[in-house]
Amino acid sequence: MVTRATAPEGFRRLHADARALLADWRTPDAAQESLRRSYLSHLDARPEAMWRGGPAEHFTASTFVFDHDLQRVLLVLHKKAKLWLQVGGHFEEHDRTVAEAATREAVEESGLASLRALPQIVHLDHHQLAATFGRCRSHLDLRFAAVADEGATPVVSHESHEIAWWPVDALPEPTDPALLSALPRVRDRLADQTA
């Protein structure tokens, strides 16, 4: 088990960045504020939770990728979760920031090389995981948003069965309920930030 003392420098840097992002984030509602405070407490109590080699309950980063006019969102049919989800995953030691990690995961899982990403958190979700995820038991997901270039064509990765653009108001089943509730607000925030 990795501890604070044995953590590689890259993960200590990511811990500091996650803490700063969460401390500065103005949440949109009471539920997200409660999660923000919970995440900060977890970071303080378990700094080694920034990496997969830490505790079974650890942090991840994901990205809601929208098409150029914000009418469609890119989702993957995740092999382990068996749900349509946004792209994302675990931190790696070479990631310089949490936002960079989220973008890296988006590029790796979508094949889209050019994404215009917001550097701020747009949503938080703490979710339990099925046994198919191995030693991972729950993810404290830090969610970001990005816009793809017009005409961008995604490519399915080894982590997914399928990848596709979906109209924001006509998402596939099965889809994570947290994604369904977050998507309209995230799209509105992205529209405000990219206008």
Image (tube, rainbow, N blue to C red):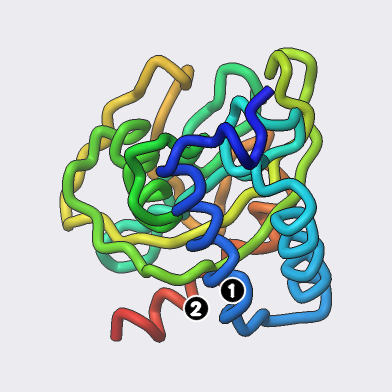
- Going by the numbered disc 1, the residue's amino acid type is Arg
Residue placed at 27% from the left, 35% from the top? 154
Label at residue 114:
none
Q: Say left or right for 50 vs 190.
A: right
Closer-to-camera residue (41/131): 41
Quadrant holding the N terminus: top right
Q: Say left or right for 162 vs 178.
A: left
Percent position of residue 41, x then y: 79, 62
Percent position of residue 177, x then y: 74, 49
Location of residue 177 with respect to 41 vertically, above or below? above
Residue placed at 49% from the left, 78% from the top? 188
Location of residue 144 with respect to 112 vertically, above or below? below
Q: Say left or right for 83 vs 67.
A: right
Report helix, strand or loop for mark 2: helix
Quadrant holding the C terminus: bottom left
Counting other residues with Cα less than 10 Å from the Cα at mark 1, is it few (<14), some (14-19), or many (20 or more)? few
Percent position of residue 126, x then y: 75, 49
- Going by the numbered disc 2, the residue's amino acid type is Asp
Q: Which residue is mark 2?
A: 188
- The span from disc 2 to disc 1 (Cα, nearest Å) is 5 Å
Residue placed at 40% from the left, 36% from the top? 93
Closer-to-camera residue (125/7): 7
Q: Which residue is mark 1?
A: 185
Pointers 2 and 1 in contact (C-beta within 8 Å): yes
Percent position of residue 57, x then y: 76, 36
Report helix, strand or loop for mark 1: helix
Closer-to-camera residue (149/114): 114
Quarter residue 69 falls in: bottom left
